[in-house]
Image (cartoon, rainbow, N blue to C red):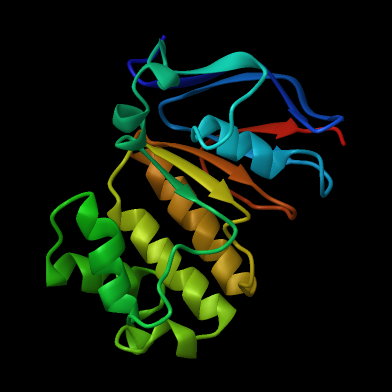
Amino acid sequence: MPTRSLEVEDLHLWRGERHVLRGVRFTLGEGQALKLTGANGSGKTSLLRTIAGLMYPEEGRVRWGGADVRADLRAFHGRMVYLAHEPPLKADLTARENLRFWVGTRRRLTAKLIDGALARVGAAAFADQFIRTLSAGQRRRVALAGLTLCAVPLWLLDEPATNLDADGQRLVAGLIGEHIARGGMALAAVHHEMEVTGSVIELALAS
């Protein structure tokens, strides 16, 4: 077994009377990405939130490196980043200020690192604009810059290419490919084809 692995074991989750997750199981190792597919309402977001420790399954468990993540959620959160459907950005801060605030609580950042991340995702031109003045696609690019800066092995991504054009979708695929090429892991809920280079597996959730 790889030193770092994410193991999801027979997860069952109900929302009221609805059985959302039905015995979901998979293992994700170093240098692998998993594309999570399924119709709206099939449980993609619920699965990501459960893995991240934000929802509690009725049955099953999530393991990181062989240990149940709930034994030490704080330590697990230090090894992963969850990029939800809505980017975690503050409207009255600039793009650069957001990255310093969001990622700076996790690691030491320099101006050079921030500028490099913004340039990598095509956001340098609006680095000093307030988030509230940016389009949805521009905000998504800022969030992707933050993702690359977090420097953690596990990425949990909920529709990471939302509001992006074809070039932006290729950017997302490229970022995931680079991450897994460095030995990272990524789990991405997607609703369209995403051509990621490297070791990619797919899990389709039934609605």
- Where is residue 56 shown, x and y percent of the image? 59, 27
Determine if residue 6 is in view. Answer: yes
Report which quarter residue 78 is drawn in.
Answer: top left
Quadrant of the frame with the N terminus: top left
Report which quarter residue 98 is drawn in.
Answer: bottom left
**Nearest the camera: 187 or 88?**
88
Q: Is residue 121 left or right of residue 150?
A: right
Q: Residue, x 60% and y 62% (percent of image)?
A: 161
- Where is residue 110 shown, x and y percent of the image? 12, 65
Determine if residue 34 is in view. Answer: no
Quadrant of the frame with the C terminus: top right
How many dots with numbers?
Answer: 0
Q: Residue, x 42% and y 69% (percent of image)?
A: 89
**Nearest the camera: 16 or 191?**
16
- Where is residue 123 shown, x and y percent of the image? 39, 79
- Where is residue 174 shown, x and y percent of the image? 48, 56
